[in-house]
Amino acid sequence: ANELIETDVMIIGAGPVGLFAVFELGLLDIRAHVIDILDKPGGQCAELYPEKPIYDIPALPIVTGQELTDRLLEQIKPFEPTFHFGQRIDELTRQPDGRFLLKTDIGNRFLAKVVVIAAGGGSFTPKRPPLEGIEGYEGTSVHYSVRRMEDFRDRKILIVGGGDSALDWTLNLQPIAKSLTLLHRRDEFRGAPHSVAKMRELVAGDQMQLRIGQVTALQGSDGRLEGVTIKTKEGEERLDVDTMLPFFGLTMKLGPVADWGLNLEENLIPVDTEKFETNEPGIFAIGDINSYPGKLKLILSGFHEAALMAQQAHHIIYPDKKLLFQYTTSSSSLQKKLGVR
Ligand code: FAD
């Protein structure tokens, strides 16, 4: 059975704003667990523009999406957040004792006193190739991510795509697969050059196949794939595969946030601007997912929202403790928490 993890705060979304929330909560002695459907931290910054420069982060005249993520991770390290990647929070319900029960798509459960929704534009969702009947194979023969490599041992695998995910999983799964074919529209790859070179080496050594073309149909029954039809320059042909991994990128969809009984306005969660709390006491919404008069969808707004949210979270988690306003520059107690004193 999946364990039940108890925590003060559950942060939904490991984008820049969810990450900085760990810091602001940590200064107030509040520990957090952070969950994201992606397999890595950074949200849009890491997934959509890791190498593009951002110019409007205070005091960082230029920083790329990935660098910002790395710096945030370094900054929150003293507070030892626990990350749970590759999982989506699907359910959020209040328990009779006032705490919140959260359930993920793979059955993990969390019990938290406070929930911080930092879900940005919603959950990143893999783009589904437009193939008839593909839904019926999802989760059994068609997968959009690799959670456990072992599940792919001795399989006849087809990987589709030309980016880093397609190349990385080609290189990782090739040694354990029964056979592996990489299929891409063009003989040009967007992935890291050293991965491309390694893949070409495997092809030259006959350890895998590379085909240029597109999948046009799937064959099989009861969720079990038995083969696919591909179209190449030479025409149509059938590939004998039992597993397909399409890596066509991700899009953002609001997803399960809509089912949690929270007020929504145009797919955003209205909050007040004092505490950034939703219509449900104890559930906060910060970053791109919230709305209030004058809201700007900027990273710096989310950082401010995290600081004010943490003040109210403190009232909920330590109802009898008085909160003193302190500077990190001069407070020895804050410096101890940060491990710099
Ligand atoms: P996000 O970064 O969207 O992260 C939210 C995370 O929550 C995602 O990883 C998502 O998978 C996860 N999530 C959602 N629902 C669930 C769920 N149910 N369970 C588990 N996980 C979930 N902003 C600037 O300030 N300056 C810029 O120069 C700038 N340039 C940009 C350039 C581009 C190309 C883009 C696309 C955006 C840019 N932005 C910029 C906007 C900035 O990236 C966003 O404001 C910022 O990422 C919002 O952070 P966030 O943490 O609120 O959400």
Image (tube, helix red, strand yellow):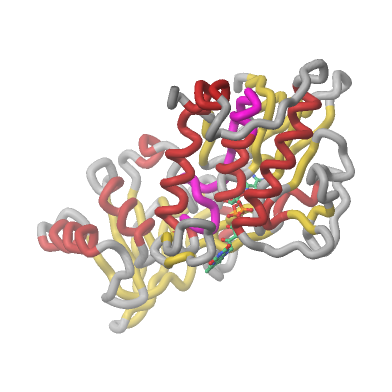
* Residues drawn in magenta: 25-46
Residue 245 position in % (x across, y down): 43, 55
245 is higher (above) or lower (below) than 40: below
What residue appears at the point 33 percent right and 78 percent down from the top-left corner?
232
Question: Can residue 142 be seen from the camera position used here?
Answer: no
Q: Is residue 17 left or right of residue 91?
A: left
Identify the residue at the far left of this view: 205
| Image quarter hosting the C terminus | top left
Residue 314 position in % (x across, y down): 74, 27
Is residue 43 on the magenta stretch? yes
Residue 53 position in % (x across, y down): 43, 66
| Image quarter hosting the N terminus | top right
What residue appears at the point 29 percent right and 45 percent down from the top-left corner?
177
Q: Nearer the viewer, residue 244 or 33?
A: 33
Write down the quadrant of residue 321 in the picture.
top right
194 is higher (above) or lower (below) than 273: below
Identify the residue at the far front of this view: 330
What residue appears at the point 55 percent right and 51 percent down from the top-left corner?
138
Q: Nearer the viewer, residue 239 or 303?
A: 303
Is residue 166 on the magenta stretch? no
What residue appears at the point 67 percent right and 40 percent down from the top-left corner?
89
Write down the quadrant of residue 326 in the picture.
top right
Q: Is residue 107 left or right of residue 43?
A: right
34 is higher (above) or lower (below) than 191: above
Residue 94 position in % (x across, y down): 84, 29
Which quadrant contains ligand 1?
Answer: bottom right
Q: Nearer the viewer, residue 31 or 214?
A: 31
